[in-house]
Amino acid sequence: MRPRWRKVIADWWSNLSRFILVTLSLMGGLFSIGIIAGGYVTTLEDMESGFKAISPSDVRIRTEAFDQSLIDYVQSLEGVVAAEGEKMLFAQLQTADGEWQDIIIRVLPEEEQQINLVELLEGRLPQEQEIIFDIHRTIDYGIGDQVTIQTAAGQKRQLQYTGTVRDQTIGTLSGSYFVAPVYGYIAYDTLPWLHQEKHYEVLLVTVDPQLSAEDYKALKDDLTGLVEQSGRYVFTITDLRNNDHPNSGYVRAVSNLLALLGLLSVLLSGFLVYNAMAALLAQQMQHIGILKAIGARQGSIIKMYMVFIFVFGLLALIVAVPLSAWSAQALGQFLGLRLNFRAGDLRLVPFALVIQTVIAIILPQAAGIIPILKASKVSVQEAINSTGIQIDEFGKSRLDRRLEKIKNIGRPLLISLRNTFRRKSRLVLTLITLSLAGAVFIATFNVRASVEKYIDKVTAYILADVNLDFDRNYRINEIEAIAKTIPQVVLVEPRSAATAQLLNDQGEALETVEIWGTPPDSSTIKPILLDGRWIVAGDRNAIVLNEAFISNYPDLQVGDIINFNIKHREISFVIVGFFQFIGNDFFLAYAPIDYLNEVSGNRHKAANYQVVADVSLVEQDREEALARTLDETFRSAGFSIRSASTSKSIRGNATLGLDTMTFFLLIMSGLTALVGSISLTGTMGMNVMERTREIGVMRAIGATDRQVMKLVLIEGVIIGLISWFIGVLLAFPISYLMSYIINMSIFGVTGEFSITINGFIIWLGIVLVLSVIAGLIPANNAARLTIREVLSYE
Amino acid sequence: MTASLTPSHGQGALIEMNQVGKTFYSASGPFQALKDIELSFYRGEFVGVIGKSGSGKSTLVNMITGIDHPTRGKVFVDGIDIHAMPESKQARWRGRNLGVVFQFFQLLPMLTLAENVLLPMDFCNMYSPAERPERAYALLKMVGLADLAHKLPGSVSVGQQQSAAIARALANNPPIIVADEPTGNLDLKTADSVYNRFTALAAEGRTIIMITHDPEIAGRLTRTVTLKDGEIINQSSVKTLTPAGNTTNDQGDVNR
């Protein structure tokens, strides 16, 4: 080996701890980029491919009872790939302690399942009098146990639990995956055992993916016509073609943030590497002088150090690639479990690998080239006389002079304070890294608070204190009378629902719209009005539309007439206002309940009731007890009730999704914090190394190990505190940006912006701990230096 | 408050080195830097430790300051076995009893001259916090730097820096001053004033141990200890110090 390369290796070896630090810094950056890029790709890929693999239905037609013959007929239509029947039962599952919890039972088709496949994870598919459960909710039982089901009509039946599955369609239709109750699956032949008729109520169809939009629309019309011709009424037709996984909104939100964090990581790694390179090259100055004195040309010196730097990148890459791939997969597994998709196996993502390689190779070279060029141009004389440390002249800047004026604190603290500002460019880079990490961390809490606030506002449309859901429409005055026999019930407000088709001027159906009927001036709805007003007393065919109408039909104005097809009748409404709900994908409208019931043929009836409880009860958090009383009262009176749940529990479930996202974001900001603390450790390490001589002097004049350690630790804490302060300032715009991205991705609206103190306080605690940890190794090294070493360092 | 050892012209040895040996181990094998040194220093002495580069001068002085540990033998300062002390206690002891002056002054660049002088008092908790600044100014005044007390080391001359370093060495009023080639980086005139300062300090009863290359200085010292290859090859006569810095011969040279 040529001596110059021996020197490169010897340099590595003799400065091992510093090189490990630099390599670790780079590795930290590459790791987070790898996990972000890898996680981004695998999560999106897995969710998309996993969802395709279950053959999700393209069209879903809810109609009156039908059997296999209709399915066979539909199957024969051109363009139809598969057709299948489905039935859903709303029932209750007895918990181990004898309580009842809501369950939706999906009846698997008689023939082999072809659409909306459930993926068997454990055990086996159910046969007669057997049941399997989806994994998204934990239940009190294990495979092999007998479970008790109570139907809406009140009959209790035992079924054997034979397996668990993953059903990726949960959350497709209404509400969110996170508010979904327990899902159970039974065989078609189990229906009579549960006192249910053997028939289907929902027709699922998958179509040829090659079909053009027009052909697809024609096929949809054919399907509707066919069902109607068979003498059945079509309640709803839901177009699910091109629909993604129901939780893809969350993944999109997370992915968008990932991209942002990825960019941040690249930036931070760049700073780290530059920081390290500049210090390293300064240390090598004398060697450069010697090399030049014995005839090395500038080009050879540049080449030597470029190779030297290349080794950092290569080493960091070799470790970071598998580590980040593994972590990305672990992250995928976690998200898969929480967001209901099947995470793929461990794999190298080419995209992530390319980014990591490019960064590992180019970034250190780019960061090193300036100091290398500078060093290689230095004269032999200058280089040989170099002290081996970067120029450090305290006292020149205005800031230094201000610091000089601070006198009324102890000398040791003064040293820490002034030391902090001695290497200003290094300090700035460290502060950028740590402050950004802090800002993202703090923002995570604010984003959560913002989304929670929005969820609260939105659920205020739908929910009072207790939500009563019946299996069918019941007379409003009958329900009210029974509910009011319970003393804690203050108000019972009916909600009726109708599915309608929005019609254009030619009478053609455009969109499926959910219209909710509500009493005028409802005291339980607090709308976020975008334009116009809410429904008031005296309104008849008034309607308030959500923001989906504004985005998709911008010409619509307050005062316009709008036509819907409700139960084969063309009904006109007058638009009185627009309100904000959860985005542009979902068409929702509110109308006076009496009018809506009149046009949908359900006069004086409703299936959903909002119950307002006595204030004292709510204050004591005892709505749960009221919900149970209501459930028992109606059930014993012979009503078919699906569920009686408190709005708090529904809201609580909705925030479960947020928990996943918050956790995920915390992991990400934790990674950024990791890079930040590596950067701080690096900075402190380099500071200590440069001040070896001073530390020795301090020990020579009486400083004890503890005093030396304290000096270094306090310096770290000062840096941590400054970064916290800057992080706090940065947290505001970053929180706003992140809240915007998340709200847009999940709800399609800008949503709310909220600030919570939690993030600020927690980050303060973390940054202090990180600062102390980052300072510990350098402080310990500083304390261990003997004065002899110090003098020989000169 | 005074230092724990009181400077005086007492007759007993202040520093005793008993059979002190130091071996360094390196890739090329063991290297004996000091070979069974038997040496004493007395109160009020101004001793020069002389020798060529690699002779063991710095190692010898490092044994006295506790900066380095002997491989064999013991070092007693005022009857205390300094190497038996734990590291931290030793640092505090050193700060209170030894003033160290370095060749490159080693003032902390981010502290003013006054703050540099205050630092040993802070570290060793000597004098009351109210007394400390007063003492620092008095010491700086003594070395002629009263007007520059609030300057950073980088903005004063090297001679002034060394004067400040001497003031710092005196901060805790130590009975022993150890100086490692304190004039190595100074011009003749400044070096001369440094020697005068040391002579005056020795006259006060302090023991000054100074590593030097300068043969000219020999006349100002009470004793010289010459080292070669880790052994004392010559000890000059003990002289009595006069306030002017001149010495008179009391005993003949002791040779080994």
Image (cartoon, rainbow, N blue to C red):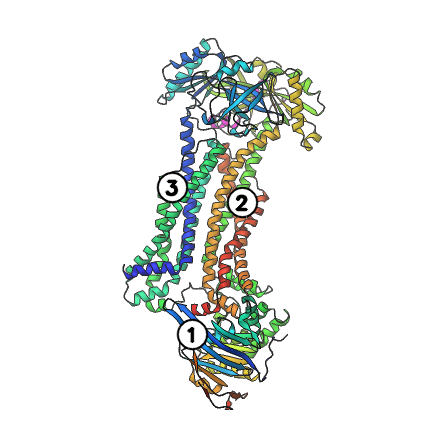
Residue A515 lies in the magenta stretch: no
- Can see residue A535? yes
Determine whether, in the image, residue A159 is placed left or right of residue B26: right
Q: Label 2, on which residue?
A: A442
Stretch in magenta: A534-556
Rounded to the nearest angstrom, the CA distance separating label 3 from label 2 is 27 Å
Are the two marked residues, 3 and 2, in contact with CB atoms closer than 8 angstroms? no
Q: Amino acid at mark 1?
A: Ala
Amino acid type at image mark 3: Ala
Disc ID at residue A446: none
Q: Looking at the picture, do discs 1 and 2 lie on one chain?
A: no
Please name the amino acid that badge 2 sits on.
Ile
Residue, x 45% and y 26% (percent of image)?
Answer: A120
Q: Residue A412: percent from the left, percent from the top?
A: 56, 64
Subunit that carries the residue with mark 1: B
Q: Chain of mark 2?
A: A
SS label for mark 2: helix
Q: Label 1 vs label 2: CA separation? A: 58 Å
The residue wearing badge 1 is B33
Q: Which mark is residue A352?
A: 3
Place residue A589 in its image quadrant.
top right
**Foreground: B188 or A136?**
A136
The picture places residue A346, in percent across and down from the top left corner, at: 40, 38
Question: Up-down: is A112 above or below A691?
Answer: above
Q: Quadrant of the C terminus of chain A?
A: bottom left
- Work out whether mark 3 precedes mark 2 in sequence or the reverse, and give the earlier one: 3
| Placement of the N terminus of chain A among the 4 image quadrants | bottom left
